Image (tube, grey):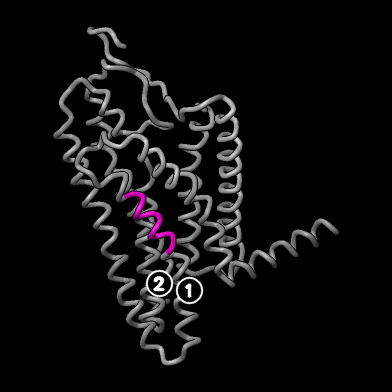
């Protein structure tokens, strides 16, 4: 416990409960997930940059998503491994951008190259990064205006804002309410373009006369839709709640889903279900083998 006249300036992360043997098993599992996440997302970034067949807005946003996933896991997982916020907003904004891209590709294919030109793609990515960083300035400032004298032990595997507020001696209700409103505005605001885009996409696909054409169109959007479901479902559970300090154990589980499992699955979801990416990977491996032989 902290002295009545001093405030905690350092916090200890309690991490996961259990024996040392369990911690060793968790370390091995999360370390494996982290390495695969880094390698898988790095491969996606490289092949999108070097393969001309993948020089389109869809794959530009995919490489941007992979970059964000690497940053998210690199911020959180090493700390978690050592102890045995978030770039989530940027990831959700990228999901929204990818949904709009798929809408233009399916519903306005003849105008796709005009609407989704390189200048537009670069600017929307820049705006998403700037908005994401600006949206975190006040929450970070407000959080560290509080006094922390209850304890300096944080029941999480990273510095979770909700659990940090729980340790404060001050009244945090107003700050929690503002954080709730911000979460609703950001998450719902980025979800609306996604819902609208997929409504038009599904409507357009259902009008395709051939069954093979409908199947191909659905197959193209399925990977992105899967990631949207996981990403938005997890973030809605984590952030859109009036009382930010509730549900420690549930928060840990959902945080693992956002920061470990989703970045781990994304490379597999987007590569195993995408013929162009698989072709680019095969060609890249052939070139590497040829260079090694020479």
SS class, disc 2: helix
Q: CA distance from mark 1 to mark 2?
A: 9 Å
Q: Is residue 45 left or right of residue 291?
A: left
Residue 153, horizontal then vertical, whole percent: 37, 20
Q: Which residue is mark 2?
A: 102
Q: Is 290 above or below relative to 212?
A: above
In the picture, measured across the screen, residue 289 lies left or right of residue 134, that is: right
Q: Residue furthest right?
A: 294
- The answer to which image quadrant residue 280 occupies is bottom right
Q: In the rendered image, which quarter contains the N terminus?
A: top left
Q: Identify the residue at horizontal 46%, vertical 37% (top origin).
A: 76
Q: How many marks?
A: 2
Which residue corresponds to the image point at 31% horizontal and 30% vertical from the top-left?
A: 163
- Report the span colored magenta: 226-235
Q: Residues within 10 Å of mark 1 (few under 14, many from 20)?
A: some
Q: Secondary structure at mark 1?
A: helix
Above or below, comparing residue 4 to residue 283 in the picture: above
Q: Which mark is residue 220?
A: 1
State which quadrant residue 103 falls in.
Answer: bottom left
Instruction: Tell whether 147 sits left or right of 261.
Output: left
Toward which corner of the image does residue 136 lie, by quadrant? top left
Q: Residue at x 24, y 23 (%)?
A: 168
Q: Position of residue 110 (x, y in %)?
A: 40, 84
The percent position of residue 92, horizontal first and vertical second, equals: 36, 54
Query: Which badge, 1 or 2, is on the more N-terminal residue?
Result: 2
Determine contact: label 1, label 2, CB under 8 Å: yes
Residue 135 image offset from top left, x and y in percent:
27, 44
């Amino acid at each position: 416990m902290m002295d009545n006249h001093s405030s905690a300036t350092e916090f200890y992360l309690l991490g996961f409960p259990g024996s040392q043997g369990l911690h060793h098993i968790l370390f091995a599992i999360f370390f494996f997930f982290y390495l695969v996440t880094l390698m898988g997302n790095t491969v996606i970034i490289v092949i999108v940059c070097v393969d001309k067949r993948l020089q389109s807005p869809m794959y530009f946003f995919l490489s941007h998503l992979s970059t964000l996933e690497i940053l998210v896991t690199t911020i959180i997982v090493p700390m978690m491994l050592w102890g045995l916020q978030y770039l989530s907003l940027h990831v959700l904004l990228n999901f929204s951008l990818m949904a709009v891209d798929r809408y233009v590709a399916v519903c306005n294919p003849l105008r796709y190259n005009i609407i989704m030109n390189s200048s537009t793609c670069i600017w929307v990515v820049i705006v998403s990064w700037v908005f994401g960083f600006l949206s975190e300035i006040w929450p970070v400032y407000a959080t560290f205006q509080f006094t922390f004298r209850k304890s300096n032990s944080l029941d999480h595997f990273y510095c979770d804002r909700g659990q940090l507020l729980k340790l404060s001696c001050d009244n945090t209700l107003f700050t929690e309410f503002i954080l709730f409103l911000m979460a609703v505005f950001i998450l719902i605001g980025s979800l609306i373009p996604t819902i609208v885009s997929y409504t038009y996409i599904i409507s357009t696909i259902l009008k395709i006369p051939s069954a093979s054409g409908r199947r191909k169109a659905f197959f193209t959007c399925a990977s992105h839709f899967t990631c949207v479901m996981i990403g938005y479902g997890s973030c809605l559970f984590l952030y859109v709640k009036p009382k930010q300090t509730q549900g420690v154990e549930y928060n840990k589980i959902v945080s693992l889903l956002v920061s470990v499992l989703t970045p781990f699955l994304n490379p597999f979801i987007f590569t195993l279900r995408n013929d162009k990416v698989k072709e680019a990977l095969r060609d890249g491996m052939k070139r590497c083998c040829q260079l090694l032989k020479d």
